Amino acid sequence: MNTKEDYIGVFDSGVGGISVLRHLRRVMPNERFLYYGDSANAPYGIRTKAEVQALSFAVVEKLMARGLKALVIACNTATSAAVKELREKYPDLIIVGIEPALKLAADRYPGGGIGVMATPMTLSEEKFARLLHRYDVTCDIYKIPAPRLVEIVEAGKVDTRRTIDMLQRLFTPYRGRLDALVLGCTHYPFASHTISRILGGQVDILDGGDGTARETRRRLDEAGLLREGPGEVVIENSWNSPEILRLSWRLLEGKSLTNHWKEEKDGK
Ligand code: DGL
């Protein structure tokens, strides 16, 4: 039996889902969040579907043992590979999975050019194909896989010359074609200021974090499971190192990554 005091479990292949946790905490400040990043097994996006399913099941089993009233899959890749199977395994649990915010972009720019940047797995899965076909009649949609950006965010190195060069090359074919860019991987919002600098201010950069947080709130409210009192965040990671936990808290607190590794090296 779920209680209001149980955790909201949030998981991702690594630190990316913290971009969703930020929205969750903003929308539900009184909740207890248990965040699990599976950085030891990241990136998920270049693995097989069966591997991502097995990894997701293992993480969720661990979280369930701690007492959950809801699960947020803060990973587009894991949602596309495993949300259906997780819902079958845990029919009584509220499960919300993030998806690329294509609807938001298509509603905002009818007939426009929309880039969807995500992992190769998200872009090749059936779930995304269905979403795409709903909007590609009216809009020009471009799939932009960016697996390396996941590792760059995991390493906390979004502002380096190499990252900027890589992103410049990635976006060259889409210059002048995009009204909006959907960040369909939860790691990418941590590089959004760099992406925005490269694309120029006229491209609207969107992600599904806010929608996922609101949907989670709505489902908990409907079930009478919203909590009162002071909130709490616990962060755990399969790569059980102080560095990855420091990076996670830094991302949660919205601190810039620019000096992160210098400070790590200097022991600050
Ligand atoms: N953050 C994840 C997502 O939203 C995936 C990153 C990875 O490839 O591990 O898709």
Image (tube, helix red, strand yellow):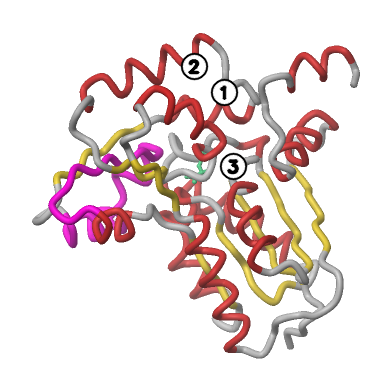
Span colored in magenta: 109-135
Q: Earlier in the sequence, mark 3 or mark 1?
A: 3
Residue 253 forms part of the magenta stretch: no
Q: Is residue 236 left or right of residue 199?
A: right
- Element type at mark 3: loop
User: Between marks 3 and 1, how big is the CA–CA gap?
Assistant: 13 Å
Q: Which residue is mark 3?
A: 16
Near mark 3 (Cα within 10 A), the count class, few <14, some 14-19 or many ≥20, is: many
Q: Could you tell me if the residues under marks 2 and 1 are in contact, i.e. CB atoms within 8 Å?
A: yes
Q: What mark, if any, has residue 120 been given in the picture? A: none
Q: Is residue 75 above or below residue 217?
A: above
Provide the residue designation for mark 2.
163
N-term-proximal mark, 2 vs 1 = 1
| Image vertical order of residue 213 relative to residue 248, above or below | below
Q: Position of residue 146 (x, y in %)?
A: 39, 30
State the residue position of label 1: 158
Residue 46 falls in which quadrant of the image? Answer: top left
Of marks 3 and 1, the one in the foreground: 1
Residue in the image at 55% along x and 27% along y: 151
Q: Residue at x 42, y 30 (%)?
A: 196
Which amino acid type corresponds to the residue marked 3 in the rendered image?
Answer: Gly
In the rendered image, the residue lying farthest to the left is 137
Say whether residue 156 is left or right of residue 82.
right
Q: Nearer the viewer, mark 2 or mark 3?
A: 2
Whether the residue under disc 3 has CB within 8 Å of ligand 1: yes
Residue sitting farthest toward the front = 201
What secondary structure is marked by label 1? loop
